[in-house]
């Protein structure tokens, strides 16, 4: 950045240059920038002197870009457009009166929604909007207040707080679990019908990883129920379609309701976790701050 400063003398010269090049007139640029025309002319001359090249061909009534000027204008205008879009997005985000929580459909359906009544009782004036996505969105680019992500807690441009360690146990509908009378070891689980989660984008462990953790033999079946959304996996498990992965923090409510049962003695702590994430560069609104603290406390 210091070398750029030496090349252009002052960032103000680039602002003046962009206005003059875009309007095709030093006079119109001066009007737009609310300065006198000689100030624009002087700024352009200083920039040309610093760069060692002419940027404009001057005539009596107009100016035109030289080849060097056109090249600089293309780069400067593109950079200014990106800066303007980002500044505008951050400004809108700071001014917005709602809070967006982005998470997987399973987290929204089975963790957040059962707690919404308590949330609204605690914060009746906060407009909380739940957003599901098949991918991990760019928090800053998409104006998202908070998000839930699986990982180790380290993401560029983000701060995070662990809300649940990743603990997985086999789960099934009560009648399926009761019918599995020969389910005495992890190895015997491989002989039962398993429901497979195949996320298209998010990285998630699968049955092969589970059996490998327990050093149990396992051969990936060529057939079986394969679903690309964990919310669908849980619905299939509740319907009695077989055994599924049971992330503890998501399935707790379903187990408490008696819709599912799990083999807790085969719980697998993967070392990863589920984190509440927010931008490290954009200030959280007061509403988003309260939502963040409520989720962490919950």
Image (cartoon, grey):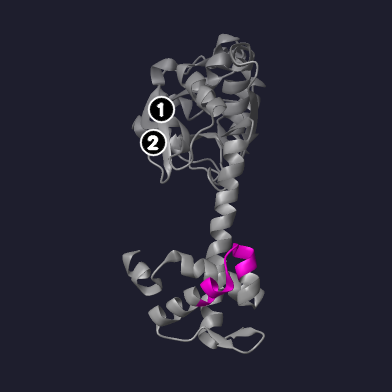
Please determine whether, in this image, residue 258 is positioned above or below residue 201.
above
State whether residue 242 appears in this view.
yes
Q: CA distance from mark 1 to mark 2?
A: 7 Å
Badge 1: how crowded within 10 Å, few (<14), some, or many (20+)? some
Residue 222 placement (x, y as % from top left): 56, 44
Residue 162, numbered circle: 1
Badge 2: how crowded within 10 Å, few (<14), some, or many (20+)? some
N-terminal of the pair, mark 1 or mark 2, is 2
Q: Nearer the viewer, residue 126 or 215?
A: 126
Left or right, residue 30 beside residue 270: right
Left or right, residue 125 beside residue 282: right
State whether residue 241 appears in this view.
no
Residue 32 within the magenta-colored segment of the rendering = yes
Left or right, residue 162 beside residue 133: left
Label 2 sits on a secondary structure element that is loop
Label 1 sits on a secondary structure element that is strand
Residue 236, numbered circle: none
Please determine whether, in this image, residue 166 is positioned above or below residue 117.
below
Residue 99 placement (x, y as % from top left): 60, 30
Magenta segment, which residues? 30-41
Q: Residue at x 51, y 14 (%)?
A: 181
Rendered image quadrant of residue 212: top left
Q: Residue at x 35, y 29 (%)?
A: 214
Residue to which mark 2 is pinned: 153
**Which part of the image, by quadrant, shows the N terminus?**
bottom left
């Amino acid at each position: 950045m210091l070398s750029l400063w030496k090349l252009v003398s002052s960032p103000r010269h680039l602002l003046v240059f962009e206005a003059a090049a875009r309007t095709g007139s030093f006079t119109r640029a001066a009007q737009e920038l609310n300065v006198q025309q000689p100030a624009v002319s002087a700024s352009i001359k200083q920039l040309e002197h610093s760069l060692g090249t002419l940027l404009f061909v001057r005539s009596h009534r107009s100016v035109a870009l030289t080849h060097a000027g056109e090249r600089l204008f293309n780069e400067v205008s593109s950079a200014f457009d990106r800066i303007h879009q980002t500044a505008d997005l951050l400004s809108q985000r700071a001014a917005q009166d709602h809070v967006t929580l982005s998470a997987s459909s399973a987290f929204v359906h089975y963790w957040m929604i059962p707690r919404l009544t308590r949330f609204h009782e605690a914060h009746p004036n906060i407009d909380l909007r739940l957003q599901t996505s098949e991918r991990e969105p760019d928090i800053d680019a998409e104006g998202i207040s908070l998000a839930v992500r699986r990982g180790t807690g380290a993401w560029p441009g983000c701060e995070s707080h662990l809300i649940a360690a990743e603990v997985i146990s086999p789960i099934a509908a009560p009648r399926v679990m009761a019918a599995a009378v020969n389910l005495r070891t992890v190895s015997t689980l491989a002989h039962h019908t398993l429901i497979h989660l195949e996320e298209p984008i998010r990285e998630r462990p699968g049955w092969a990883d589970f059996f490998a953790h327990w050093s149990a033999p396992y051969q990936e079946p060529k057939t079986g129920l394969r679903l690309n959304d964990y919310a669908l996996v849980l619905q299939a498990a509740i319907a009695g379609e077989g055994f599924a992965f049971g992330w503890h923090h998501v399935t707790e409510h379903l187990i408490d309701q008696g819709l599912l049962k799990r083999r807790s003695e085969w719980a697998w702590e993967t070392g990863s976790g589920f984190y509440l994430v927010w931008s490290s560069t954009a200030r959280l609104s007061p509403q988003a701050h309260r939502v963040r603290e409520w989720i962490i406390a919950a």
